[in-house]
Image: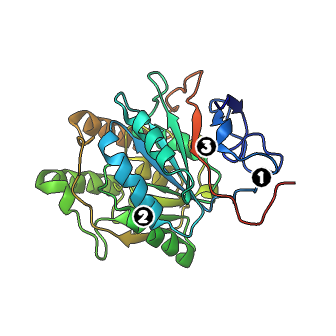
């Protein structure tokens, strides 16, 4: 049986002397199973070029398909998939089981499960915690409900690299984009919320057709997670306003129907969004929600495959 160990450093093999990643903050520790790694001497896994960050809350029914589609979409790109989970159901167990079945696949899979008292900032706070934990140069954020097609991820990465952008937004309102999966009522609400944001921040949101999108890719070095003050699930708006110098581009996509689970777009989230707009417009210096004294633990579930022919020294 493997022994559970902790290391304050990396997403790569625990305590590896060859690691050149970024130190994780004090409130996140790495927990990896010893039997996840072959015996020494071992090959060195390549550093991920892309991190796919998935905030989840009670999305157990979608995890298996989501993992398979992400892995297929990013084939050929060294990728880590990080779930930041705020669930009260069995979603964490489903993520662990699905990742275990895929061990030896093309993607590294990790989980940060935030328990009660650790869920500061809502799903936006989950994204901020995920950004602190990854060291890939590019980070893609998408929902777990399969309304954001993972097949769009390579297009976002290609667009950002082609246009020299820091941020690539998957938009429902540009080019071939469609919002059919929202339904008529949510379409009206989404459009109204987006228009309100553009009215309040005409300069920061210039050229962005879908500031309400939850599907985007960002250059990790261009973002300071500690400078974010997320409240609710509209983290893209937070990024655009608080990091006003981000160079952005867009890729149209079709917003799909939800396969399983329930929408997180509740009245409560709507009120949180209105409050967040007020904080952004009138109180940009307002303090962020306090972080818990003991933060969530990052658990490595499946390592990135080693680069053939490369041995650790």
Secondary element type, mark 1: loop
Is 160 drawn above or below residue 99 in the view shown? below
* Callout 1 touching callout 2 (CB < 8 Å): no
In terms of depth relative to the viewer, which is nearer, 15 or 308?
308
Judged left or right of residue 88, residue 168 is: right
Secondary element type, mark 2: strand
Is 60 drawn above or below residue 51 in the view shown? above
Q: Distance between the residues labelled 3 and 2?
A: 22 Å
Q: Residue shown at 29%/56% (left/top)?
A: 147
Q: Name the residue under label 3.
A: 133
Indicate the position of residue 25 as horizontal and vertical percent values: 67, 36
Indicate the position of residue 224 as horizontal and vertical percent values: 61, 48
The residue lying furthest to the right in this view is 313
Which label sits in the foreground, 3 or 2? 3
Which label sits in the foreground, 1 or 2? 1
Is 104 drawn above or below residue 159 in the view shown? above
Q: Which of marks 3 and 2 is nearer the N terminus?
A: 3
Is 235 drawn above or below residue 117 in the view shown? below
Q: Could one spot residue 119 in this view of the protein? A: yes
In terms of depth relative to the viewer, which is nearer, 109 or 134?
109
In terms of depth relative to the viewer, which is nearer, 127 or 107?
107
Q: Distance between the residues labelled 1 and 3?
A: 24 Å
Q: Mark 1 points at which residue?
A: 42
Q: Name the residue under label 2.
A: 169
In terms of depth relative to the viewer, which is nearer, 135 or 210?
135
Q: Could one spot residue 208 in this view of the protein? A: no
Indicate the position of residue 168 as horizontal and vertical percent values: 47, 66
């Amino acid at each position: 049986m493997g022994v559970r160990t902790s290391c304050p450093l990396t997403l790569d093999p625990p305590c590896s002397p060859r690691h050149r990643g970024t130190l994780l903050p004090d409130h996140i520790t790495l927990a990896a199973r010893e039997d996840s790694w072959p015996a020494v001497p071992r090959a060195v896994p390549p550093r991920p070029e892309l991190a796919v960050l998935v905030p989840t809350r009670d999305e157990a029914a979608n995890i298996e398909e989501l993992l398979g589609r992400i892995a297929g979409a990013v084939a050929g790109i060294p990728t880590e998939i990080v779930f930041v989970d705020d669930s009260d159901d069995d979603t964490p167990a489903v993520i662990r089981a699905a990742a275990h079945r895929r061990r030896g696949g093309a993607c590294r899979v990790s989980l940060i499960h935030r328990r009660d008292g650790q869920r500061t900032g809502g799903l936006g706070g989950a994204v901020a915690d995920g950004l602190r934990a990854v060291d890939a140069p590019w980070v893609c954020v998408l929902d777990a409900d399969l309304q954001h097609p993972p097949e769009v991820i390579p297009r976002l990465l290609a667009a950002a690299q082609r246009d020299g952008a820091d941020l690539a937004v998957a938009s429902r309102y540009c080019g071939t984009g469609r919002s059919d999966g929202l339904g008529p009522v949510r379409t009206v609400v989404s459009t109204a919320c987006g228009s309100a944001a553009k009215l309040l921040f005409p300069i920061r949101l210039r050229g962005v057709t879908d500031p309400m999108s939850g599907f985007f890719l960002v250059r990790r070095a261009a973002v300071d997670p500690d400078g974010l003050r997320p409240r609710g699930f509209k983290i893209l708006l937070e990024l655009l306003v608080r990091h006003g110098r981000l160079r952005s581009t867009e890729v149209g996509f079709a917003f799909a129907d939800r396969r399983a689970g329930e929408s997180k777009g509740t009245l409560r989230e709507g009120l949180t969004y209105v409050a967040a707009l007020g904080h952004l417009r009138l109180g940009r210096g307002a303090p962020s929600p306090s972080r818990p004294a003991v933060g969530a633990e990052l658990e490595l579930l499946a390592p990135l495959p080693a680069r053939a022919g490369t041995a650790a020294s």
